[in-house]
Amino acid sequence: MSKSILIIAWGIVSAAAASAGEYHVDTTAARMVKFISDAPLENFDGTTSRIDGFAIIPFDTLQAGTGYDSSKFYFEVDLNALDTGIGLRNRHMRENYLETGQFPFAQFAGRISDAVREADSAFHLTIAGGMTIHGVKQPKSAAILAAKEGSRYHVRGQFPVALPDYKIKVPKLMFMKISDTVQVQLDFYLLPAAAAKD
């Protein structure tokens, strides 16, 4: 992953981390980002485990209407690692459409815009900010569930991404038909920063 970007971002938010819970993506646990294309004649998924990033979320004090201002998150996905199950399709997607040689990462950064505590250890969160794909940044919001499991939070969510919004040409070749809008699924763990550094 782009560690230099992450290091710079962590430095920027270090002051906020002192007063709020800082978490990093647990890179030792199972991670999954899936892009689901549901085109009329063909359905396929592109999947990768290469997600990294951090979040500053005051889970201990978070409740509806409060605790949002101190929250921050930054996540990035290595698009070169996307696998659709067919090598030729992978190459065309990376080289001709996502142009990963020039734009290797998808990035999502922002803060919490809404929170509902489901139980003492689970939160339905709405996160909002900017998503950058193919060098184009667009506003994006997403609903996620963060459920505590031991010292970690299991994060899951799904949201749509319209490829034309990011100036990605949607291929119509016989062997590769992609819908204009793909569904993005997230499934990963956030680990307290102190534990992540141990």
Image (cartoon, grey):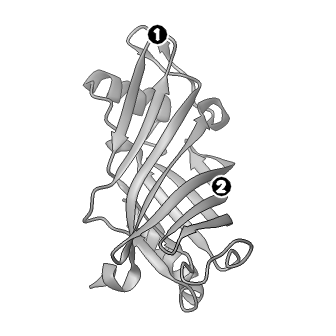
Q: x and y percent of residue 83 in the render?
A: 31, 35
Q: Disc 2 designates what residue?
A: 130
Instruction: Say which residue appears at 29% left-offset and 22% top-offset.
Output: 88
Which amino acid type is shown beneath numbered disc 1? Leu
| Quarter containing the C terminus | bottom left
Pointer 2 local density, CA inside 10 Å: few below 14, some 14–19, many at least 20:
some
Classify 25 as above or below 84.
below
Q: Does any portion of residue 111 appear in the rendered image?
A: no
Residue lying farthest to the front in this orientation = 119
The image quadrant that residue 136 belongs to is top right
Q: Disc 1 designates what residue?
A: 41
The image quadrant that residue 56 belongs to is bottom right
Gap in Å between the C-alphas at discs 1 and 2? Answer: 32 Å
Q: x and y percent of residue 121 in the render?
A: 47, 72
Instruction: Say which residue appears at 46% left-offset and 56% top-offset.
Output: 76
Q: Which mark is residue 88?
A: none
Q: Across the whole image, how many numbered discs are drawn on residues?
A: 2
Instruction: Say which residue appears at 38% left-offset and 34% top-offset.
Output: 46
Mark 2: secondary structure: strand
Horizontal side of residue 134 vs 45, given as left or right: right
Residue lying farthest to the bottom in this orientation = 18
Q: x and y percent of residue 5 in the render?
A: 47, 67
Q: x and y percent of residue 99 in the render?
A: 46, 36
The image quadrant that residue 70 belongs to is bottom right
Quick one: 10 or 39, which is closer to the camera? 39
